[in-house]
Image: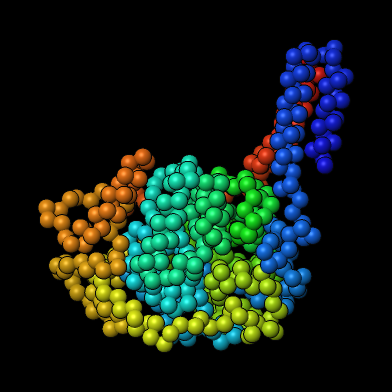
Amino acid sequence: MQTDVTCVLVLLLLRRMNDRISYKFRSACFVFIVMAWQVGMSNSQIESCSQQTCQLPACRCPSHSIPGNLQPENIPQMILIAFDDAVNWDNWQYYLRLFPPDGSRKNPNGCPISATFFVSNNFTDYCMVGKLHARGMEIGDHSVTHKLPRLWWTDADRPAMEYEVLTQRRNLAEKADIPIEEIRGWRSPFLQPAGDDLFSVLHDNNFTYDATMTYSFPKNLYSPVLWPFTLDYGYTLVCNIARCPQKRYPGLWILPVVVVMDHSDQKPCAYVDDCANNPRDKNEAYQMLWKNFLRNYHSNRAPLYLNLHSPWLNTKYQLEAMDEFIQKMVSIDDVYVVTITQALQWQMNPTPLNQLKNFESFKCPKFASNAESKKLCQFTFKHKTAPVAKNTTEEYEVTTQFPSQKSKTPINSKSKLKQGHQNKIKRGPEKPSSSPSNNEKQHDKTVKSEEAFNSHHENDIDEQSSIRHHHNYKTHKPWFLKSTAINFRQSSIFLCLVISVLFLMK
């Protein structure tokens, strides 16, 4: 409405400027405004998302309001811990420590806590992924190649995204023995969305949610946090990282990547492990997690999003801080450490605290009693961690067969790598062997298809140069710089006003 009034005022101003500016300029400006207004009108339905037209469980507008009009003290504070990238021996022991297989860490309803893992193909042991799923963890899709440079993902077209999304979902289903309908979520590498080329793939292939879109940091530690929402009326928030979706995708949920504040409350970070002011000891690491928890807990109790990469846990005091934080969470009687899908299912059907023991989505996972014994992983890995002062874990090579106890062997000992479920695809080029193994022959078709796909794109760079940084220090943009069609109309009017004023001042 405000932009329509502005448009009329500009047209009246131009009409009174016959003696000041040329006819050509007035005509050009008029045409520009009309075109921008028409573009805005064609997308004006994006502004119409309201509680009257968009209602749970299928639809939700972007909002800080609590679903179901419940009071904060009557809802659970959900903690969503999400890890990105490969699952293998480099991080396996961390996951066993934080989420014990015996289920000893429980939510208030007596069921084990859980987390979400966005798994990429490179360096992943799919048997381990299957074991995580068997223990009640959620497994999400995080691409096949995780290729660099990061801007590749911004420019990727639909065929490229179909390959990345659907091939990795198939890998998870076939190699980790996960029902394909239980792989519900996607997160783009480097938090780089590919606009409608990505979201059309997710929507057309029945994904439940995307967890890529970043959301600007709150004004302070006690500002309300954004709840997940759907794209029934398009993406109307500030586009912090282009390309954002422009079309509607009914029923597709957005789990916003709400940034956390660092331990000094000075700078925001999209990932716990990507803060500019890294914690210097266990207390600072714990306080960073605790303060961000309090922000949600004492405001609207939106889910606390803790996104990270497992190398952050290589530093001993950071692992201990995360371990202590989770232990603190399970001691609070209205806090639930759950998966992303569980949080969305609660939001679709908001349930008060006093009824959560009977809430179906929070009940203990129902797996066969022999689900764990069916997954006997057999592999050999070199477990290496980069030295960080004197606070890193030990470096060793492990050969293990679950559920037997691990045995340590010297790092220089020779052992044949049992491929089994371990992925063979590497980021960097491999030296061809003179006599290919049987496993290499079996995967020949897969490798050739990937080479054909990658021939149209840049070569992947080596593992050492693939360290990911997810900086998101962007503040809210002014209304005339937001990247939506509606704001194109606003920016055109603003530009025309500036030009008109400049001509009048001559």
| Percent coordinates x, y for residue 237 in the rendering | 66, 50
Residue 253: name its quadrant.
Answer: bottom right
Q: Residue at position x 58%, y 53% from top?
A: 214
Q: Residue at position x 77%, y 60% from top?
A: 51
Q: Residue at position x 34%, y 71% from top?
A: 127
Quadrant (top left, top right, bottom left, bottom right) of the N terminus: top right
Q: Is residue 82 above or below residue 399?
A: above
Q: Can the viewer see residue 182 in this picture?
A: yes
Residue 389: name its quadrant.
Answer: bottom left
| Percent coordinates x, y for residue 111 in the rendering | 54, 84
| Percent coordinates x, y for residue 12 in the rendering | 87, 25
Q: Residue at position x 47%, y 86% from top?
A: 104
Closest to the observer, 419 or 14: 419
| Percent coordinates x, y for residue 64 in the rendering | 71, 61
Display colour scheme? rainbow
Closest to the observer, 345 or 14: 345
Direction from residue 248 to residue 81 in the image, left or right = left
Closest to the observer, 122 or 208: 208
Direction from residue 190 to residue 107 in the image, left or right = right
Quadrant (top left, top right, bottom left, bottom right) of the C terminus: top right
Q: Is residue 452 above or below residue 330?
A: above
